[in-house]
Image (tube, rainbow, N blue to C red):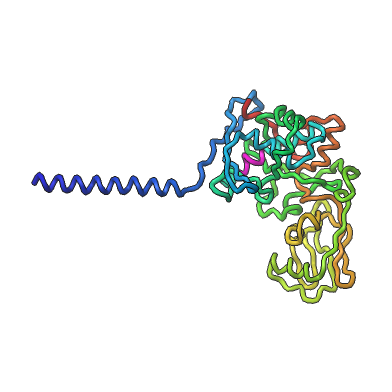
Amino acid sequence: MMNRCRYIVMILLALMLMSIITGCAVMRKGPARKPALPKIPDKISRGAGVEPSLVVYDIQTKSTRKMNLEDYVAGVVAGEMENYWPVEALAAQAILARTYVLEFIADKGGSKYANADISTDFEEAQAWNPGNINENIKKAVSMTRGKVATYQGKYIKAWFHSHAGGITATAKEGLNFKEAEPPYIKVVKSPDANAGPAGKRIWSATFTKSELATALKSISGQDPGSIDSVRIVARGPSGRATRIKIGNATVSAPDLRIALGSMKMKSTLLTSLRVEGDKVIMAGKGFGHGVGLSQWGANVMAKQGKSPEDIIRYYFKDVNVVKLWK
């Protein structure tokens, strides 16, 4: 009887040990830990929270590294704006960069790369260029340390773009956003209409018909047939094209921009669209999707003496700028 009890005890211990080993293996293969996000206070406070640390995947070195969130923000500002711009414009960008990463983690749970919280891949998140950090950027990040933009107690989707072409867009028209239009996104006249280099204020691009056909098939599988005509069939509140008919196919203008290359079809604020021989020629205003803050608009407002918070509240409706940590 004693030997039988010992045998049963040994089996139970073995089963428990196997369960622990299996559980550890599952934990090791699971997703990256989600950093503790600071609680958003109801009102602007002195910042009682703690600055989070991030695991950042660097696409240049193909490796991850841990860093303080403010160090990540400095790299984003250096990647997204010229480091000699007015500090108030850089500071507005810092508030949005900080908000962007926190909302990204809260919404998506982390990066698609290597168990990281965020990556330096601008197609997934934000541009990042720590080599461009100078005293101007350090000051902009420091003066807004811990500050984020919120709406009704939640991080906003902190969209920004290079140049609005004089007017910003709704999320649906600028990004083909599939969810409900965020209430803090609004169409406003942007003071960048006469600011910035010609390639951002106004632009033109030429595409072959075969390029258009390939782009259309990649978006929706549609065959446009013979591309003898092109026209804008729908525009959004800011005047941006939302639907474009190319031959026999009709597609989302923001999706077409991505398929053709956002550095070439610089915006959907089109002023001209026509067929010439074997080419399709486009012209437009602005650079980027047009949603949220215009970086060139922020540049102008900063030179006019506006504060970073003024700039944020101009481009985003009814948002609060709150300080989460000292």
Asked which quadrant contains residue 224, the reply is bottom right
Q: Is residue 232 left or right of residue 120?
A: right
Instruction: Single out the residue that lies furthest toward the bottom.
Output: 226
Give the vertical position of 230 relative to 12 (above or below).
below
Q: Position of residue 37 (x, y in %)?
A: 57, 36
Residue extending farthest to the left is 1
Residue sitting farthest toward the front: 61
Name the quadrant containing residue 259.
Answer: bottom right
Assess whether residue 103 is covered by the magenta stretch: yes
Q: Quadrant of the C terminus?
A: top right
Q: Which residues are magenta?
A: 98-104
Q: Position of residue 205 (x, y in %)?
A: 85, 60
Determine whether, in the image, residue 60 is placed left or right of residue 20. Answer: right
Residue at figure coordinates x 82%, y 47% from the top left:
164
Report the front residue among 191 and 141: 141
Res. 120 image quadrant: top right
Give left or right: position of 277 versus 29: right
List x then y, in percent, for residue 112. 58, 50
Q: How many marks?
A: 0
What residue is rendered at 59% in x and 36% in y?
Answer: 67
Pick the front one: 232 or 71: 71
Give the vertical position of 118 relative to 319 (above or below).
below
Question: Closest to the observer: 148 or 25?
Answer: 25
Residue 323 at x, y percent in the picture: 66, 29
- Residue 298 is one of the magenta-drawn residues: no
Overall secondary structure of the magenta stretch? helix
Q: Residue at x 78, y 50 (%)?
A: 288
**Which residue is located at x 77 percent, y 35 percent?**
90
- With respect to residue 169, does 51 lie above or below? above
